Image (spheres, helix red, strand yellow):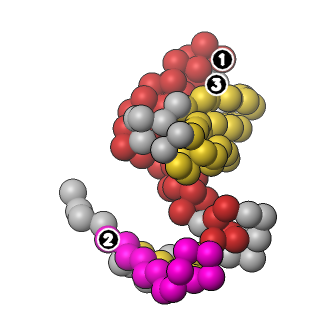
Amino acid sequence: MAIRKAEATWNGTLKEGSGTFAGGSGALNGGYTFKSRFEDDMSLTNPEELIGAAHAGCYSMFLSAQLTNAGFPPERIHTTAEVDFGRDDKGPVINKITLHVDAKVPGVDQAKFDELAQKSKEGCPISRALAAVPLELLTKLNS
């Protein structure tokens, strides 16, 4: 397996400063600010949105592998990750991640799909890395 790299730089104070990030491949880069993270500024991204994108992508790939290995190659798996970002007594915290999965998988029944969806929730590398965060899975199967 490979070592994947990403980097980030923050310039200035927390509230007035800004940051940039980049993935080692060059395919991912952008900026973020206090307002894009803690307020409703949607003009830039934030670390939680990036975690959500990584989680949704990883989960979709993992579920595709599980379904294919079980003899049910999927036509489409669309996953949306909702990252609930809030505060606790120690400061900012990710309270929960909810994965909404909408999949088109010919031939699989709901019980088998749910079994493989749950297995993927537990086995996806990003889910495993985020094991300290409660994870909810909501699925919709279109066969």
Secondary structure of the residue carrying numbered label 3: loop
Q: In which quarter of the image is the C terminus?
A: top right
Q: Nearer the viewer, mark 1 or mark 3?
A: 1
Callout 3: few (<14), some (14-19), or many (20+) C-alpha neighbours within 10 Å?
few
Residue drawn at x 68%, y 69% is: 36
Q: Which of marks 2 and 1 is in front?
A: 2
* Contact flag, marks 1 and 3 (Cβ < 8 Å): no
Check disc 1 and report the residue beneath it. 110
Region in magenta: 5-17
- Residue 84 placed where, x, y %? 65, 44
- Distance, label 2 to label 1, CA atoms, is 38 Å
- Residue 42 placed where, x, y %? 76, 70
Q: What residue type is labelled 2?
A: Lys
Instruction: Tell whether 91 sits left or right of 102.
Output: left
Q: What residue type is labelled 3?
A: Gly
Residue drawn at x 42%, y 41% is: 130
Question: Is residue 14 on the magenta stretch?
Answer: yes
28 or 32: nearer the viewer: 32
Instruction: Tell whether 75 sits left or right of 73.
Output: right
- Would residue 86 be visible to someone looking at this image? yes
Q: Residue 76, located in which quarter of the rendered image?
A: top right
143 or 26: nearer the viewer: 26
Residue 61 versus residue 112 in the image, above or below: below
Check disc 3 and report the residue beneath it. 107
Residue drawn at x 37%, y 72% is: 6
Check disc 2 and report the residue beneath it. 5
Residue drawn at x 23%, y 62% is: 2
Secondary structure of the residue carrying numbered label 2: loop
Residue 126 versus residue 96 in the image, above or below: below
Instruction: Looking at the image, tell me whether mark 2 or mark 3 is earlier in sequence order.
Output: 2
